[in-house]
Amino acid sequence: MSKQYAVIGMGRFGSSVALSLFKEGNEVLAIDKREENIENNQDSVTHAIIGDTTDEQTLKEVGIRNFDTVIVAIGDDIQASILTVLLLKELGVKHVVAKAVNKSHGKVLNKVGADRVIYPEKDMGERVANLLMASPNVLNFIELAEDYSMEEIKVPESMNGQNLRNLNLRANYNITVIAIKNSDKMDILPNPERALKSGDIMIVIGGNEDLQKFSEID
């Protein structure tokens, strides 16, 4: 069942969160005070608006209290981040997730009502470690750098029955398969002779443009 999310702050972190939620079929509202950030992400979300979320009226006009979760991903203005979280809770938003740039920032966000505070760099390191230990709790998309990511991609029907050696994905698509998982288990650094099945999910690393091209294969 899809949910309604609002993402405030469409920098690298906010835009990757918004895109991941949108790709999973959720309704996503993106808000940023910079027109450029909205223009860059308007096709990756359900709705995108330019607005200053330290203004209570802006939040009221978008019906912010009706969203299931609001993610505050403002990273370059700590004061705006804190004030936004405070306003969201005062307006009755049930679940607010806020990005912190350091521990002091995180403590303040907790005090003004954030339901969850995340530290993207720390969290990302933990998720990658879990992946390498074959944890089943892998995200669909993890941004590793500005233009480089780790992503879960279903094996295309056209590759059903073929093995990794013959497909040579690194040479042909410029991506690297680090694991393959199905309902039974996760296979880290799979044997090149392993035959792929259409129900398998490949965990791959590569440039964002290369990953996008590969994900569009039928």
Image (spheres, grey):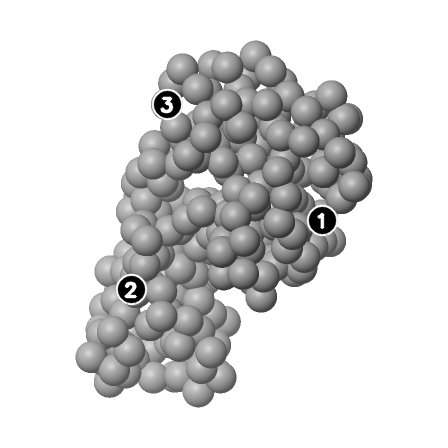
Q: Residue 25: percent from the left, percent from the top?
A: 65, 60
Residue kind at label 2, given as amino acid type = Gly
Q: Is residue 214 above or below residue 78?
A: below
Q: Gap in Å between the C-alphas at discs 1 and 3? A: 29 Å
Question: Dot 1, crowdedness within 10 Å: few (<14), some or many (≥20)?
Answer: some
Residue 117 vs residue 87, the one in the foreground: 87
Q: Which residue is mark 3?
A: 102
Residue that carries the numbered disc 2 in the rendered image: 206
- The image quadrant that residue 162 belongs to is bottom left
* Residue that numbered label 1 is attached to: 3
Label 2 – label 1 distance at C-alpha = 29 Å
Q: Residue at x 46, y 20 (%)?
A: 106
Residue at x-position 51% and y-position 38%: 73
Q: Is residue 78 visible?
A: yes
Amino acid beneath label 1 = Lys
Q: Nearer the viewer, residue 200 or 64?
A: 64
Which structural element holds mark 1? loop
Q: Residue at x 73, y 53 (%)?
A: 1
Tell me, yes or no, if residue 130 can be seen here: no
Residue sitting nearer the eye, 208 or 204: 208
Q: Earlier in the sequence, mark 2 or mark 1?
A: 1
Residue flagged by tag 3: what amino acid is it? Asn
Query: Residue 39 appears at what percent x and percent y?
Result: 54, 61
Whether label 1 touches label 3, CB < 8 Å: no
- Among numbered discs 2 and 3, the one appearing first in the sequence: 3
SS of the residue under disc 3: loop
Q: Who comes first in sequence, dot 1 or dot 3? A: 1
